[in-house]
């Protein structure tokens, strides 16, 4: 559904930024000055005003406007006619922390549009409770319509994105199954070679699908819980594809002598810890340098980023190192395999939590950078 986008759009209204003034219908739409063009939470409609209920209307009691929808430039079809609320913007000075929106803002008069006017409007919310943003209304003209069609950011329909999402999760499973099959002694070398080629091709396809999937999601969709499963799935596909390309064979090593079982477990843990520490150091360095290089932030922001991503890099590195040593663990005695499995299971949820935490932090930083750029404009 589009509820997350609607909520983001409403948050943009509350936090956005120009001084309050009488909302006039604008004649010319300038793409560089209209931030709502870049926010796909808002539908963009060409409408004709049929009726206005604006007696004693204020910001707190806004006008109700009946519109005939002439054309949908962005968003879903809402039918030939809709009733909308003509909404004023809420800015920082209109909100008190303890009281919410001020009474002065609620009592401020708010006029509706002229009947019969043909306009381009930005609408948000479901059809039965839609609102039109009174501060971004433009008179219809072929030039304004062309500007919208050229510059309006969109998000791909869920009818396309959802199947692609599940395909991104299914392909790595198929890749792993085929990869394990390449080590079977029951198939010929020629069949093994073809399976390895198929695994590598599917890994490339997975990467291409991920790029396509991300291209359909705008920068305003910063609530990306889908990445909890998408990134590990794509990463698994790429790693297995590389292993297949280099003819890595998924076969357990010869059983270790009984006296070396303990040392085998310790060696696996030691190697995983070393990889975890290396990942933590690399993540901390990247986290420290990225805000400075990309956003020009100070040392405090850089240290905060490093402190957040560093410990999570340790968990991510250890989990992946343990996972990639599964072939070695299969050769250990049953109690050692059990210990290995328990450790892997204990790190499973911290691993996903770390991936989510890092990705959420990165997206929040990128969103903050976008907001800061808009405010500077």
Image (tube, rainbow, N blue to C red):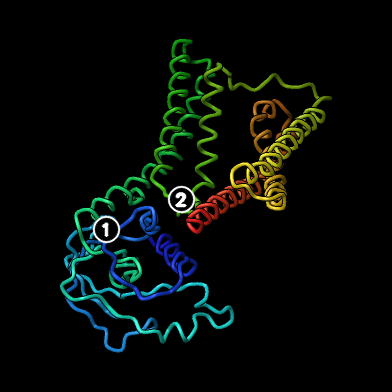
Where residue 91 appears, as percent x and y from the top left, is 48, 72
Where residue 56 appears, as percent x and y from the top left, is 31, 89
Which residue occupies the foreground of this view, 37 or 308? 37
The image quarter in which residue 54 lies? bottom left
Name the residue rendered at 37%, 58% in the picture.
34
Horizontal side of 278 relative to 70 (left or right) equals: right
Measure the alpha-carbon separation of dots 1 and 2.
Answer: 20 Å
User: To which residue does mark 2 refer?
Assistant: 219
The image quarter in which residue 278 lies? top right
Image position of 134 with respect to 74: above or below: below
Image position of 340 with respect to 43: above or below: above
| Label 2 crowd (10 A; few <14 / some 14-19 / many >=20) | some
Name the residue rendered at 59%, 22% in the picture.
250
Image position of 12 with respect to 63: above or below: above
| Label 1 crowd (10 A; few <14 / some 14-19 / many >=20) | few
User: To which residue does mark 1 refer?
Assistant: 76
Where residue 124 appears, as percent x and y from the top left, is 34, 66
Where residue 238 appears, as percent x and y from the top left, is 52, 29
Q: Secondary structure at mark 2?
A: loop
Horizontal side of 300 relative to 144 (left or right) equals: right
Q: Which residue lies most toward the bottom here?
A: 56
Which residue occupies the foreground of this view, 150 or 180? 150
Q: Earlier in the sequence, mark 1 or mark 2?
A: 1
């Amino acid at each position: 559904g589009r509820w997350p986008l609607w909520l983001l759009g409403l948050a943009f209204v509350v936090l956005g930024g120009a001084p309050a003034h009488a909302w006039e219908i604008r004649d010319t739409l300038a793409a560089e000055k209209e931030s709502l063009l870049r926010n796909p939470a808002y539908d963009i409609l060409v409408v004709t005003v049929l009726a206005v209920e604006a007696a004693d209307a204020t910001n707190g009691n806004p006008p109700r406007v009946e519109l005939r929808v002439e054309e949908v430039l962005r968003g879903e079809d809402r039918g030939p006619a809709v009733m909308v609320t003509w909404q004023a913007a809420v800015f920082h000075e209109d909100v008190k922390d303890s009281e919410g929106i001020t009474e002065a803002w609620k009592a401020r008069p708010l006029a509706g549009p002229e009947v019969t006017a043909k306009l381009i409007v930005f609408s948000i919310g479901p059809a039965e409770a839609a609102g039109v943003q009174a501060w971004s209304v433009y008179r219809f003209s072929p030039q304004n319509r062309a500007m919208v069609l050229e510059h309006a950011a969109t998000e791909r329909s869920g009818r396309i994105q959802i199947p692609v999402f599940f395909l991104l999760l299914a392909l790595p499973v198929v890749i792993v199954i085929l990869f394990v099959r390449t080590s079977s002694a029951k198939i010929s070398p020629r069949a093994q070679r073809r399976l390895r080629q198929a695994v590598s091709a599917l890994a490339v396809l997975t990467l291409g699908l991920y790029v396509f999937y991300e291209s359909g999601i705008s920068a305003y969709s910063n609530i990306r819980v889908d990445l909890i499963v998408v990134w590990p799935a794509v990463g698994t596909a790429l790693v297995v594809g590389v292993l297949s390309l280099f003819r890595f064979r998924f076969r357990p090593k010869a059983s270790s002598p009984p006296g070396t079982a303990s040392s085998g477990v310790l060696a696996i843990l030691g190697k995983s810890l070393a990889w975890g520490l290396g990942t933590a150091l690399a993540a901390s360095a990247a986290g420290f340098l990225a805000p400075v290089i990309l956003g020009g932030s100070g040392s405090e922001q850089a240290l905060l980023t490093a402190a957040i991503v560093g410990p999570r890099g340790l968990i991510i590195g250890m989990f992946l190192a343990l996972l990639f040593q599964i072939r070695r663990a299969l050769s250990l005695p049953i109690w050692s395999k059990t210990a290995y499995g328990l450790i892997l299971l204990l790190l499973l949820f911290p691993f996903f939590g770390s991936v989510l935490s890092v990705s959420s932090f990165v997206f929040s930083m990128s969103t903050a950078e976008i907001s800061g750029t808009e405010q500077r404009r």
